[in-house]
Amino acid sequence: MAKASMSKRRQKGGEEAAVRERILEAAFAAFMKSGYATTSTLEIATRARFEARALRASWQQTGNADRLHRRARQAI
């Protein structure tokens, strides 16, 4: 039983990493197209195929918007 729960946790972590990567790629594309100041969370969420409400909540709670912006700028 412990192996099954460990595997599920590992799988969930992999899924979360994939979602973060999709969001980062979507944000980078949106920033390049529209600029940081005019890019909305709805645009990023739509490009990333992610729920906009969940994206906004995550950003507000953890300050991810600044981190996302920094990572996108580093990729340029």
Image (tube, rainbow, N blue to C red):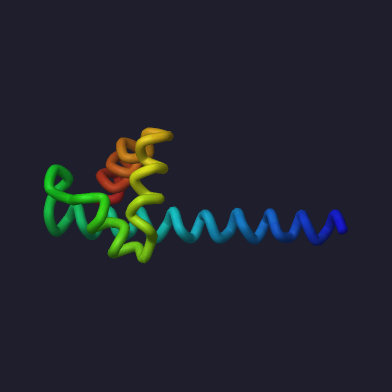
Whether residue 20 sits left or right of residue 37 in the image: it is: right
Q: Quadrant of residue 43?
A: bottom left
- The residue located at (33%, 54%) in the rendering is 52
Using the image, determine if residue 66 lies above or below residue 5: above
- The residue located at (44%, 53%) in the rendering is 20
Residue 28 visible, this angle: no
Residue 30 position in % (x across, y down):
21, 57
- The residue located at (40%, 50%) in the rendering is 54
Whether residue 22 sits left or right of residue 8 in the image: it is: left
Using the image, determine if residue 41 lies above or below residue 7: above
Residue farthest along the right direction in this orientation: 1
Residue 3 position in % (x across, y down):
83, 58
Whether residue 64 sits left or right of residue 7 in the image: it is: left
Quadrant of the image containing the N terminus:
bottom right
Residue 60 visible, this angle: yes
Residue 57 position in % (x across, y down):
39, 42
Picture mark count? 0
Residue 69 position in % (x across, y down):
28, 42
